Amino acid sequence: MILAIAALLRLVAMVGYAPVMFFNDSFDYLHVAVKPQPHQLRPNGYSFLLQALEPFHSFALVALVQHLMGLAMGVMIYALLRRRFGIPGWGATLAAAPVLLDGYQIQLEHLVLSDTMFTFLAVTAVTVLLWHERTTWKVAAAVGLLIGCAWLTRSVGLPVLLGVLVFLLIRRTDWRVLAVLLAASLLPVVGYMGWYKAERGKFAITESNGIFLYARTYKFADCHKMKDIPVQEMPLCTEAVGGSRQPNSQDGIWNAASPLNRYTGQRFSPEKNKIANEFARRAILSQPGDFLKVVAHDFVRVFQWRRTVFPDPATYSQYEFGRRSAPLPEWQMGGGTARQEANLYEDGDARTKLNEPFASAIRIYQDHVYLRGSLLGLILLVGLAGMVAMWRRFGGLAFLPWSLATGLLLAPAATAEFDYRYVLPAVPLACLAAAMAFGPEARTRFAAFRRGGRAAPEATPVPSLEDVVADPKVPAPATGSAG
């Protein structure tokens, strides 16, 4: 029933806002899909998807594929909780509901952006790993390839790889299996870096990490507290009071008054990236307390009850189903404008068109049905409580989705700045971890704590996948490890 409702909501979005919706970054992804080249700002994983779908000349197909990814994530969460962890149907449905029914999740899937694809790859990797009682080399290879593709979709895929490796190390997985997973994850990444080397002369994925890290330090960096600043870094110094510093961290990149614009050349260049990276590292080492303060501030912002307009009205409005259709931008994209490239991809007018009453219906739905930040915090706490019950096993299997969800929330706060779109990829993993806290093994240990003693969980046979498909009421918990 929930799955049918979720599919209907996505159909309403597709009819109401045809053929698709755009964000500022959409046109960068589209540009390198139409004219393949390794992008200096962000990896091309999502652009590869756009390129694969280009022969169909349909942004509606892009939206459909992404909406199917959203539905598939809900199905994976439900099936994993039922088959592997013996969670009742209502509990598994509740865990899958946020990714299926959240209005902002649906809108994100309808945008030409990499976030849905990244989240889908991460959730699929976790599902494949936890679905199997033992991590064989074949499972490791599949998980590694998924993580490698996620890494090429968004740079935050690297922390996902590290989190999975730590999880498997804790579970004492055979080193050969770890080697297979690592090799499989690096295979697409190294291949991409080779292409980057051939095209741009450097063995890298991007050349923007230093600039984004500079943006993180932009709000607090005080050159009076930094020793021995090289001459080439001094243009990055700003005064907090009465100076040229703008209010948000991302102003350090995108605002016309950014100190980066004191250098000549393109906004993203190897030279600027190197200088910005050295300056940012110097600021963090000189002012670790200030760095932790801005990270904590952005991390806590995730858990606010109400969504506030941030970082500015123009950006925030692009995360919502709007009341009117905006014209496609006329930015120069190298040989053409953003509008021209979008129309070329669509082989027609790609501008978003509102069709009533469907547009109003999904817009009103988004205004009222979404996961509040405070509820996400509660979900993480529930998952943490379940891990505490399994403290002798480092939190058990729930350690994987819980640590990845927390890491995906911390990574932007530590390396860039808070953004609402960076919150949603953590939601399905957090819900999965919270639901696992109610599995039979965790319940047995909680009962033992209440009695003041210890009790070993009963061994229960794991049904085959064929049994689950034949009768979804038969799933039973598995007590074996994933490694």
Image: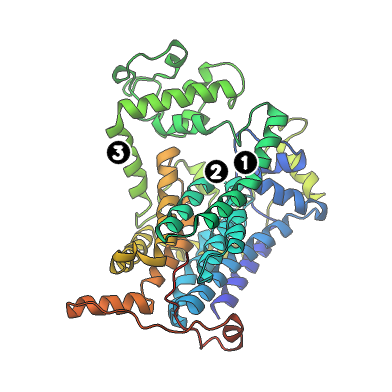
Q: How many marks?
A: 3
Viewer-nearest residue: 432 or 341: 432
Amino acid at the residue labelled 1: Pro
Q: Residues within 10 Å of mark 3 (few under 14, many from 20)?
A: few
Residue 352 percent coordinates (x, y): 68, 52
Sequence order check: which comes first, mark 2 or mark 3? 2
Residue furthest out toward the left = 452
Distance Cα–Cα, label 1 vs label 3: 29 Å
Sequence order check: which comes first, mark 1 or mark 3? 1
Which picture quadrant has residue 433?
bottom left
Vertical side of 445 occupied by 187: above or below: above
Distance Cα–Cα, label 2 vs label 3: 24 Å
**Residue 114 visible here:** no
Viewer-nearest residue: 16 or 279: 279
Residue 438 percent coordinates (x, y): 36, 75
**Residue 225 visible here:** yes
Question: Of helix, strand and loop, which one carries label 1?
Answer: loop
Q: Residues within 10 Å of mark 2 (few under 14, many from 20)?
A: some
Q: Which mark is residue 43?
A: 1
Amino acid at the residue labelled 3: Lys
The reply to whether the C-beta atoms of the residues labelled 2 and 1 are less than 8 Å apart is yes
Question: Which residue lies under the disc numbered 2?
Answer: 155
Residue 66 percent coordinates (x, y): 64, 59
Question: Of helix, strand and loop, which one carries label 3?
Answer: helix
- What residue is rendered at 45% in x and 71% in y? 95
Q: Residue 472 carries which label?
A: none
